[in-house]
Amino acid sequence: MGCNGCGVNVPADPALQEMIVLGCEDQYLANTDGDEQEIGALDDQFLPVTENDVKANDIEVALFASGVGTKRRKELHGSTAVRSLSGTWANDQDPVTLQCYKVEFLCSDNTERYSSFVLLIDAVLDSDISHAEINLNLGDIIVKSSVSPCGSLLLSTAQVDDAKKFHEFFFNGLFGKLLTGSASAEGPKIFLLSPENRPSWIKSMYFLLPANTSFATSPENFIVDWKSVQACAHVIDFMNRRFLSKQKEILPVSAEDPSVECKKVTCIRLADKSLPLNEHNNMVVLAIHTGKLYTVIDLLTEMSAESPFDDPDAGYFSFSDYFHKKFGIVLRHPEQPLFLLKHTHNSHNLLYLPSVSKGGSSHRENRKKKPQTHAHMPPELLISVGVSESILKTFYLLPSLMYRLESLMLASQLKEEIRSACNVSCFLILEAITTLRCDESFSMERLELLGDSVLKYAVSCNLFLNHQQHQEGQLSVHRAKQVCNATLHRLGINQNLQVYIRDAPFDPQSWVAPGQIGLRTRDCNCNLENSEAQVKVFPDKDEGKFIIGRACDKGHRWLCSKTISDCVEALIGAYYVGGGLEASKDFMRWLSMDIDFEPARLEEFIQGASLCSNCPQQEDLQLLETKLKYKFAARGLLLEALTHPSLIDSHSCYQRLEFLGDAVLDLLITWYLFKTHEDIDPGKLTVLRAASVSNENFGQVSVRNNLHDHLLHGSDPLLEQVKSYVESVENEDSELPPSVKVPKVLGDMVESMAGAVLVDSKLDLGVVWAVFHPLLSPIATPSSLKLPPFSLLLSLSSTHALPLHVTCTPDGPDQVLVELRLRLGDSLLVRQSRNRSKKEAKAAAAALLLRDLQACLLLLPLFYFF
């Protein structure tokens, strides 16, 4: 679940949802309604705009009104090809030099042995990719694959053709079809790899070939196992001869082959040759009548083609009868023992999240395990392919491996376009362009949360220093406009970012290797002409006629508009993780965001604050510096940070510094939680951040460190509010939330002082964190975080099946009366509260009801979540 206004991740638990929705209420208004009001309603001075002003913003108004940046708007976009895998070299008639990357596989429990392969491409891969380690999940087994560069290799024209045949034979034989046409004896069949039917190589260019394990010194044999590659040529030649002859009977073994004369007890006759009995185990074979690949398990000496057919209800007397009636084949050696064969199977998605899927059950449980079935086959219908069983098994790992490598290449491609001076990991960029819908072990959610804070901070600094005459309200409106989803969507689209987003799980049945003909096609019905932009809005009323994220054969796919905005924030977060604030600024500059300011403006602001350093409160300011353990170079900044707008004699107040401090504390706390809690899901991380940066938490920080004693104001009611809250914190049970609402001024003080330290230290985030980390501690953790009163009451009532009834009724012109009724056995607990805000009234009534509940049940300690 997500909050459409601020884009935060909301967990499924109702109590946590309540906490997030309440905590995001103000931000939602700033990012949606507030922004919409500013556009076309008020100017920078909060005066009515003119007709010309409205026309200047017509485009942005239209974008926002049409749902840009929201989940309800669906858009049709194109995708992009991997440039590292593009080219024409596989179709050229010239030798080619390719870069080689060895891929090795290691089974976690050492029960399976897999062959090493070599990836050959016409490009030098990013270091992250050329040394990548990728886990492939096979149920209870993890296969760890590793990539390493191994130089370059010159391939002759003949080697290129052999490699293409190897690709075409195995990828079509395992994941497609080698024979097309009718399966019955009457219909004609076509061999896919005949000279006139061979697949075209157009979409991507690379070879995946078995690696040589003999470590031969010959340069041409050092990397690729050419013996296994060239073994396919013999099989293809034999099949072409058979289908060229148009015979339904099996071609006999050549009379010139001396092995034909071997005795029955010492050899068996295959379709193309004779084979000693002791060489059949784990042999990979091709059935010439179906084009299917098998692995030989055993030779059944007690059975022959004359034995009764293994399915008595199928209507065949024997295996010979079955092959004659089904395929029109007359066996020449029906007396031979039968082979027991293991079927090949379809490839699976080995990149799934190994723990729990969206539905709550594991993928291992969701994947239906079919019982292992075996085939009985006369040897004369089989050709020995000439590769090891381990090579065949490894092929099932290659689709998932290559999909991940292709995704990393796309991430590297995007990184090249951004051209940041900081070398950010391709894995981080891949995480930032991967949505939850991909159902992998990572997604953009956590980076999006971090990027939201980084963006807020960068924009706030720029506005604060470039608009020094603007007040906090004006700055907030400008910031909301610059960081809202509609703006981020527009910036992302302008840079064609949407073509890189991964928004659907890997589908092995739709994946095709070079030289493979896909069986599952998705015809393009998008009605997009080449001259049209690759974007199309889907009407809400027609929703359901398409699948989000799934691409047609031309690469068009539907995306939620908000996904593009989320990806922008996630990439900001990725660049912050990979290279700090300057790296994230590089990305924001690439998006043409206004986040830069002249350094002279910072010096100018500090110098202006220094002029206010001499004041009667010097001793008080020195005492506060002692508490903060920080000495201001421009003490006037601290004075401004303590001054409430109610102080009439003051020329400035803390509101502008509060605007800046809100952003810097949000970033520092989010970054701290991001690094400290790497294993919790994004929803819980969002809840932690919401609680840590809330006004309630900052108010407690102010009281806990006696910062409120230094507030400069001219309001007696404000003083009474502060005193009342301080007394409630000092006198009441720490297990319960304070019954008195925290005055907003206490939280504002903490934020304004953070803004003052930031400016005084010349925007040194490390200095700000060194000052405020001790003050903020202990920072909320999953085990210590308490729910707000109403959310806690919801959680308790749900956990213990206590019926809770909430009634909200208007009470006068500007207040609401909230009544909470909780049934506890035969007792009914009732509490009421009035407030101008329904949220505050519910919180106050819930806090009172929790105390009643504690008195009745002696619930100590009260419940925490997680």
Image (cartoon, rainbow, N blue to C red):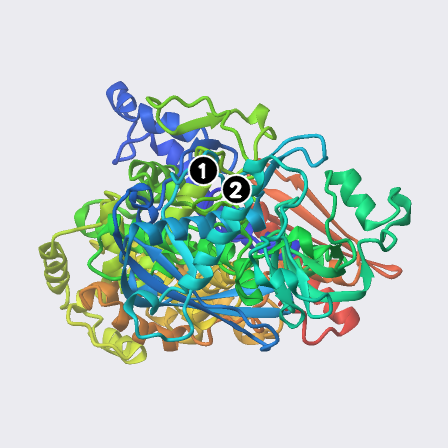
Where does label 1 land, which residue?
A: 195
Pick the residue in front: 76 or 248: 248
Q: Indicate the position of residue 583 as horizontal and vertical percent values.
A: 25, 59
Q: Residue at x 73, y 73 (%)?
A: 859
Label 1 or label 2, whichever comes before in sequence order:
1
Image position, residue 137 (x, y; %) = 57, 64
**Amino acid type at image mark 2:** Asn
Labels 1 and 2 touching (C-beta < 8 A): yes
Type of amino acid at the residue the image marks with label 1: Pro
On the image, numbered disc 2 is attached to which residue?
240
Residue farthest top in this picture: 51
Q: How much space separates mark 1 and mark 2, taking CA atoms?
A: 8 Å
Relative placement, left or right, of 351 versus 719 is right
Q: Is residue 848 visible?
A: no
Secondary structure under the numbered disc 2 in the rendered image: helix
Q: Is 337 positioned to the left or the right of 487 in the image?
A: right
- Towards the viewer: 764 or 381: 381
Residue in view at x 79 percent, y 38 percent: 325
- Packing grade of label 1 (10 A; few <14, some 14-19, many >=20) is few
